[in-house]
Amino acid sequence: MHSLTGALRGSGLAALCVALSTGLSLVLCAHTHVADLAMIHLLGIVFLSLRSSVRVSIVASLVSIALFDFFFIAPEFKFAWSDVESSLTFAGMFVVAAVVSTLSENLRQKEQEARAAAYRAEALREYNLELSSARDVRQLAAISSRHLRKLFQALVIISLQNADGTLETFEDQSPRSAARAHGAWLKREPVRAELGSGMEIWVPLVGIHSTLGVVGLEVPRRFERDSTQDRLLSACASQFATAIERVELAGAVQRTQLEAEGERLRSSLLSAVSHDLKTPLATMIAAGETLVARGGELSEPAARSLLVSMVREGERLSRLIQNLLSVARLEASRVELRRTPESIEDIVHSALEQFAGRAGAPEIDVDFDDDLPLVSAEPLLLEQVLVNLLENAARYAGPGANVSVGARHAGAAVSVEVADDGPGIAEHEREKVFEKFYRGAHTTKSDGGVGLGLTICRAIVRAHGGAIAVRERNGGGALVEFTVPLAAHGHEPATEVAFS
Amino acid sequence: MRRSHLLVVEDDVEMRGVVSLALRSHGYDVKEAATGTDALSHIQARTPDAVLLDLGLPDIDGFVVTACIRQTHDFPIIVLSARSEEQHQVRALDSGATDYVTKPFREGELMARIRAALRRPVPMLERRELVVGDLRIDSSEREVFVRGVRVAFTPTEFELLEVLARNADRVVTHRQLLRAVWGAEHLDEVRYLRVYVKLLRNKIERNPARPERILTTLGIGYRLVSTGAPGAREGD
């Protein structure tokens, strides 16, 4: 349609030019020389040649020359001439038409190409810019699909290679086109198929080491191999492939870094805790072996004390392992807490229950605000915080110490305090005690501590979005306070009246 | 009285040996199985009175074993699991396990759980009157007596207490409680339970700040205990 109206418009312009120059010559012929009339026709031809195609210009110039001959060259009103001069004039007019129209057409084509090239460059730049902002292959596929659809007015299908080497398609495709996609992928060369007035073309995304996938286009008009369209398509495909490799490389680098980080953490943990893991085990094995080998010879209280120490060391080992598991979980790259609305009283009671069964556990005072709101927490982790704090209080405040737990509503959180009336923690140590493997001034090698308890407490509290700090208790002793955010307001059960 | 017959399903030889020894010393008749398949064939050969089931078996997942057993049997299943498998415990309980004990466990606790499990739960339609420790619940009159004194309960409080009492000494999961009292569409409203358990404690505990009757099992559910309170009678 476009070229047809263009041709009509070209012919119309040509007819107008020829008619105008002939008409003007007819008006002026009585007053001027024939050479001037020839100039008028020549001007018409030049004007037309600058704007029309070579074909139209040549035909129009021939018509113009014929009319000039017919009206103005003797014998008049006949398509004939007698002098050499006229022959030269006609030849000159024809050559001017041919040369000018050829030159101007070349110029127009060059300009059009330059404009198309600029458009493609801009399109590629935009495409590239968007590709560089994508973080995963899925985003890359979406961006490519959108850009290619716009650039080629085409249906776009993108298939990318999975980790297991198979092709994953991002949009539905027929089995027939799937086969072609596969063909292009295997051959690493574009595969074309005619499709009515349009075509289907599959371009492989060739990476450094392998073919990363295939882009399929269903375009409404065919384009030739190595045409500008074709070159644009391969430029897009190569940018797409580069972007995929960049994303994959970035992912691999990040994974390696995480692995290295994890490895570092593991080895430092291992070296630090291997002693603490081995000590209780050694006690348990030694006590057990003594009982096995000489159980009959030992007095009843002696045998019993060996058994008691086996149980105690086993429990110590169990707590240590629980703490280590929590560290491992909290220090892993992404921790997803399983939070539920919890009552802090329940968590404290559960911690007290765990703690109470231990040998030498002190009596603990509990003091809660009435009607404490629910907190949003993973209950077993918070319980572990409390058990660690109670253990520290009992361990470092010494036998006969008073230990207390309190909880109160504080703004958007519940604040929990564990306090003892022991020697307390010196001011300069109050931040350090939260560091991994840091042991305070009052600790001894044999107290069963590792220097992980408070580190874990802080990690858990922070993971919940709370804060933890050590202070001095009123009247002396250590006080650890931590906060836990309140649970969001959910459905409250309707209030009821008791039947009586 | 016939000795109760227990099946211990545990892949770790040492653990299986210790548990079996402890059970035999308490007068139980014990059979052992090291795998899920082994356990199922044992059960087919002779139905035990209860099964102690480790969740981390080498061949079949503990809750798959639970589900298999539940298709044909309703004897108690007590799950033994490491504490980190808390989500699995909930799943096992929701899919039909009777109770669970975390490793490492104390012998006394394990025996108490087995005793509680062997006492069958009271089906909803039976038994007009339930006695759990110092509580007496009259289902037909919807009356509750706490240490001999009648206390008024709202309908929801009563239903919640009744479900806990019928499963006395056993952990009832959040979902089981929510389903029984509020219905299947409220299975995730743990908040309801928090509110109502607090209300119940205010009515039945001697000191609601230190509950001894309704105990919380963090992340899993609640347990109404029949013993432990001073002067409490044995529930059954």
Image (cartoon, rainbow, N blue to C red):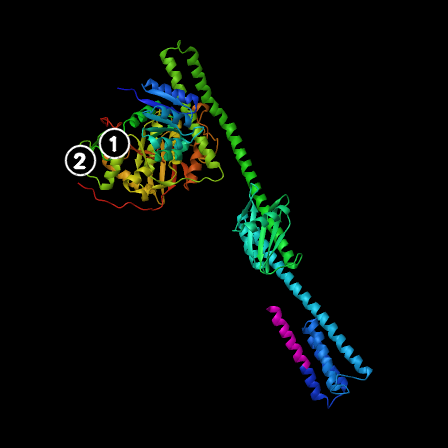
Look at the image and give the residue range highlighted in magenta.
A1-18
Q: Quadrant of the N terminus of chain B?
A: top left
Quarter residue A145 falls in? bottom right
Question: Residue B162 location in percent, x, y?
Answer: 24, 36
Name the residue that disc number 1 marks: B122
Q: Chain of mark 2?
A: B
Res. A403 in view: no
Q: Chain of mark 1?
A: B
Residue density around tag 2, few if under 14, some if 14–19, many if 20 or more, within 10 Å: some
Residue with the most extreme top position: A297
A54 is higher (above) or lower (below) than B7: below
Drawn side of residue A60 relative to residue A405, left or right: right
Q: Closest to the observer: A6 or B26?
A: A6
Quarter residue B148 falls in? top left
B19 is higher (above) or lower (below) than B211: above
In what element is the residue under mark 2? strand
Q: Closest to the observer: B225 or B170?
A: B170
The circle on residue B150 is 2
Q: Amino acid at mark 2?
A: Arg
Quarter residue A389 falls in? top left
Q: Amino acid at mark 1?
A: Val
Question: Residue B136 location in percent, x, y?
Answer: 20, 32
Main SS, magenta region, reads helix
